[in-house]
């Protein structure tokens, strides 16, 4: 007999629950209500029921009662509420959402639900879960680093906590650029000065630590910007930096690594070195780790230091690596994060204009031998992370031509391309839902485009009149959440 969530299950029940857990976790976000998920689970159960020879009706009833209770507990513990945006790249970690009835245009007053003031600028994308909006922020005129929580319905500030302080200055960036991440009960904040903290939804600090104090200077050339990843009961933090510091405190023996932290206690589960032969600034990476599932296994994908690597999320062990750097350079620092779709891993070579590659992970005996499925040599970003949405990959060159390209994600075939224009570079990454693409430039000029199709089509342009802006537009509960220099704006009816 096996105990799961307090229930005593026989071996056949336990195996079946393992299968249901796998299927429900993969399907849960398609449903708007828990009842819809349960109906889906019941259908799965009935198919299994017909194929299983239970001893008697009483046994069937006991199994179903226990299984239904297990499923409810499982769903309540593991599924996000409908419409959440718990990570800076959204519920699917690729920049997209299933939300509907989103606005195609707005103004300073039209289609605006609420506007709340913010204490200072930040490049962190808001995260939204269970009616709460979490924001990382600096405080203008101060060195304070803040965690803030707002009511998603009306924009009321529920709490503000000082989690750190830093007077460190970096070009076009702040120490509050990493985005928070949440599981619906707790929220985790990371800052460029090394502070890492867990808070509950009431704003109580559960634990905190300083990664820089423990492992040395993490302030890479343009400021640490990697966002933590919360996945399968582990909190992952990537530190990818040059071995020599750019500013005090001085050091010449720094290492790069990926850290798995217990979200409950803040203590290390494992620390895995990420060794590379990259040179000088090419050792810096502003990218965030993203999980990838292939052939029933999960890999933690990391992009930076001239390589794509896959690590075992349970142990940190490196499974394979692929060198994307076409030549050795001391300037190939990486900014954008990897994206998954159509069984491929999409990565952008650094500095803009150096191409995008679609990597096919190895399978079976060839797991350590990934290969290039296709590549794109058109306009590519320096900073923006590509968007995967409904079979297409959207690539924004935000600095040179300010060009957005739509590619077939499976083949790399170009469907359309067009110029966004605007008065400033586009550092924020494109997001999507409801057949629309949303992006905003550093000058605070937002653009809404039609997703998919065969033509580049701008639906509207909106000037938020509050710069600078580097945070991506978050999408949750039928609304857009836009973080500008001094405001948090909720757009939608």
Image (cartoon, rainbow, N blue to C red):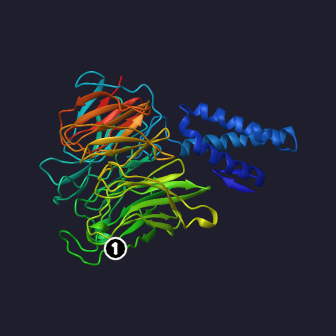
Looking at the image, which residue is at 15% across and 47% down?
140
Q: Quadrant of the N terminus?
A: bottom right
Number of numbered discs on residues: 1
Looking at the image, which residue is at 20% across and 69% down?
246
Q: Nearer the viewer, residue 232 or 346?
A: 346
Q: Which residue is mark 1?
A: 255
The x and y percentages for residue 310 are 49, 63
Q: Is residue 161 above or below residue 473?
A: below
Quarter of the image where one finds residue 132:
top left
Side of 393 relative to 221 (left or right):
right
- Please indicate, yes or no, whether residue 265 appears anywhere in the rendered image: no
Looking at the image, which residue is at 29% across and 64% down?
332
Q: Is residue 464 above or below residue 126?
A: above
The x and y percentages for residue 358 are 46, 54
Looking at the image, which residue is at 30% across and 72% down?
279
The x and y percentages for residue 300 are 48, 60
Q: Residue furthest left?
A: 141
Q: Quadrant of the C terminus?
A: top left
The x and y percentages for residue 116 are 24, 33
Side of 486 relative to 73 (left or right):
left
Q: Residue furthest right?
A: 55
Q: Secondary structure at mark 1?
A: loop
- Please indicate, yes or no, whether residue 377 appears anywhere in the rendered image: yes
How packed is label 1: few (under 14 Cα within 10 Å), some, or many (20 or more)? some
Q: Nearer the viewer, residue 22 or 423?
A: 423
Side of 50 relative to 390 (left or right):
right
């Amino acid at each position: 007999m096996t105990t799961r969530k307090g229930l005593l299950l026989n071996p056949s029940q336990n195996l079946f629950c393992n299968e249901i857990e796998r299927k429900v976790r993969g399907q849960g976000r398609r449903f708007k209500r828990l009842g819809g998920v349960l109906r889906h689970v019941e259908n799965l159960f009935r198919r299994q029921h017909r194929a299983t020879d239970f001893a008697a009706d009483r046994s069937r009833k006991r199994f179903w009662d226990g299984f239904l209770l297990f499923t409810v507990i499982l769903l309540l513990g593991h599924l996000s509420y409908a419409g959440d945006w718990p990570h800076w790249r959204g519920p699917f970690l690729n920049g997209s959402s299933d939300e509907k009835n989103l606005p195609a245009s707005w103004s300073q007053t039209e289609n605006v639900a609420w506007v709340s003031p913010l204490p200072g600028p930040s490049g962190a994308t808001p995260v939204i879960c269970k009616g709460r909006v979490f924001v990382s922020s600096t405080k203008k005129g101060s060195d304070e680093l803040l965690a803030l929580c707002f009511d998603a319905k009306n924009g009321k500030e529920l709490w503000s906590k000082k989690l750190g302080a830093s007077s460190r200055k970096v070009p076009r960036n702040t120490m509050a650029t990493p985005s928070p991440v949440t599981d619906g009960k707790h929220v985790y904040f990371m800052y460029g000065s090394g502070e890492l903290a867990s808070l509950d939804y009431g704003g109580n600090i559960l634990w905190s630590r300083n990664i820089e104090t423990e492992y040395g200077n993490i302030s890479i050339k343009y400021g640490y910007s990697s966002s933590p990843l919360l996945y399968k009961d582990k909190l992952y933090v990537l530190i990818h930096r040059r071995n020599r510091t750019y500013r005090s405190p001085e050091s010449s023996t720094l290492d790069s690594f990926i850290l798995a932290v217990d979200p409950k206690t803040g203590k290390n589960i494992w620390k895995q070195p990420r060794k590379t032969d990259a040179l000088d600034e090419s050792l810096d990476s502003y990218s965030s780790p993203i999980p990838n599932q292939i052939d029933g296994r999960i890999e933690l994908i990391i992009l930076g230091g001239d390589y794509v690597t896959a690590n075992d999320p349970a142990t940190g062990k490196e499974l394979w690596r692929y060198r994307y750097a076409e030549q050795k350079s001391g300037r190939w620092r990486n900014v954008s994060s990897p994206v998954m779709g159509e069984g491929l891993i999409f990565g952008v070579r650094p500095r803009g204009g150096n191409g995008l590659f679609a990597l096919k992970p190895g399978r079976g005996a060839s797991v350590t031998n990934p290969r290039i499925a296709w590549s794109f040599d058109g306009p590519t970003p320096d900073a923006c992370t590509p968007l995967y949405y409904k079979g297409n990959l959207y690539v924004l060159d935000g600095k040179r031509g300010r060009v957005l390209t739509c590619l077939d994600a499976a083949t790399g075939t170009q469907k359309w391309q067009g110029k966004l224009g605007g008065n400033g570079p586009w550092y924020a990454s494109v997001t999507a839902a409801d057949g629309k693409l949303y992006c905003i430039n550093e000058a605070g000029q937002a653009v809404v485009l039609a997703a998919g199709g065969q033509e580049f089509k701008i639906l509207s342009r909106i000037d938020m009149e509050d710069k600078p802006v580097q945070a991506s537009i978050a999408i949750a509960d039928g609304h857009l959440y836009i973080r500008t220099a001094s405001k948090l704006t909720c757009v939608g009816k």
